Amino acid sequence: MNEKTTCDILIRNTSILDENFQIRRSIFIAIQNGTILSITSEEPSCLTATETIDGKDLLWMPGLIDGHMHTGQQLLKGAVLDELPMIWTRIMLPFESTLTPEKMRLSASLAALEMIKNGTTGFVDAGSYFMEEAARVYLASGLRGALSHSSMDQGNFPDSIRQTTEEVLASEDRLFDEFHGKGNLKVFYSLRALMNCSPALIRATAGRATERNTFFQAHMNEYAGEVNYTLEKFQLRPVEYLDSLGVLNADFLSAHSIMVSAHERSLLAENQVKVVHCPFSNCGKGVPDTPSLLEQGICTGLGTDGTAHGGLSLWNEMKIFRSVMNSFWGVKNADPAVMPAKTILKMATENGAHLLGEEKSGVLKEGFKADLISINWRQPHLLATNNPVNTLLECVCGNDVSDSIVNGKLLMRNRQVLTLDEEKILWQAEKYFTSGEVSE
Ligand SMILES: [Zn+2]
């Protein structure tokens, strides 16, 4: 007689988006110890589950990964649309220089809520201040994430955020020592922007990341002003400049990467650098040559650039990305499939897992990490479609996400967030926006 074994979660009679981006129906998913134990078309007979989910009307897929966001700018929602340049030096940094531990706790709470409710299960924060406070909130949220300390040793900034090279490195080390590997969190090293980092800081940051077996990241090739800066100062484009310092490698995340030359693309490919585009934010700056990046085998993912750039919904980013790619690259080459739905979904899931340095993740497959979300498919804007994968990209929005599981743990069930106090966080946010103070 078969002995019953137990699993943590059993999802019964559901649909999934499989590793080949095909929809499979009447599927049973068993989750145990943070991983996907089995995906079967028949109910596993010798399995009892601690929690059973009726999967009828749901489509399960890998959770979305936000490859570039800013927790420290969460309270800037709505503050930058239509603003003249440079919003980074005129609005973002002055605001970040006024952050406090309380504001960071509220920022991380709101960001975590927004991500969970939009189906994001993992994220890479680009770096800010009081990140220890954010880390504690993210730990409690159950999200998978990589955090960084904002790293700049050059530039005329307010005293509260001005740091020497040694101070920057010490701040990054402290964050790493306390939180790397804790719960679902990692700590990455970061270079905020090349214009604000000395060569010594760039070398030391990359060196620290290698020594500690983690990733490092920078805003790259985002503005003409930044490209012109390295051209003027070093007669090299930004990626060429990093190559001259010997710091390009597979552990480097090159955020944005809009104005990238053919030579820089080959350097990214040779050194296996990973790229993250932020479509809504990037629209104001340029259109990346993603078809060529992907053709050259460069791992490319998607990010939101933080909630100040149109919110933390990767569903929005995917739709905007598809529209921009088609209008810019597709139309001029009469190629309607220049960026197909499957490619974009892969960028936001499987490639996203690579951006986080996760192995066996980003795909619904036995033995892979149980980071998955469900879409409530029984709705007029989704039901009855000729191609559910296309509909996933074209029509699904954050509000359609019903459940979220990270590392085998339910973070949201039927749109109720289980790990955070949503009512309290919304109350705090309202209070903040009326009084400018954080009430706890
Ligand atoms: Zn950014």
Image (spheres, rainbow, N blue to C red):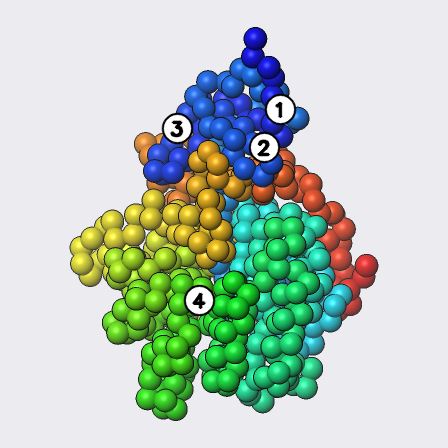
**Residue 336, above or below 385:** below
Q: Read off the residue under disc 2.
A: 32
- Residue occupying the far left of the picture: 334
Q: Read off the residue under disc 3.
A: 24
Q: Is residue 149 visible?
A: yes
Lateral position of residue 88 relative to residue 296, left or right: right
Q: Amino acid at mark 4?
A: Phe
For marks 4 and 3 on the same chain, the one whose residue lies earlier in the sequence: 3
Q: Amino acid at mark 1?
A: Thr
Q: Nearer the viewer, mark 3 or mark 2?
A: 2
Q: Nearer the viewer, mark 1 or mark 3?
A: 1
Question: Disc 1 and disc 4: Cα gap in Å?
Answer: 40 Å
**Residue 305, above or below 367:** below
Q: Quadrant of the C terminus?
A: bottom right
Q: Amino acid at mark 2?
A: Gln
Q: Is mark 1 within 8 Å of ligand 1?
A: no
Q: Position of residue 237 (x, y in %)?
A: 34, 81
Lateral position of residue 1 relative to residue 430, left or right: left
Label 1: how many residues lie within 10 Å, few (<14), some (14-19) or many (20+)? some
Q: Read off the residue under disc 1.
A: 6
For marks 1 and 4 on the same chain, the one whose residue lies earlier in the sequence: 1
For the residues labelled 3 and 2, say whether their Cβ atoms are less than 8 Å apart: no
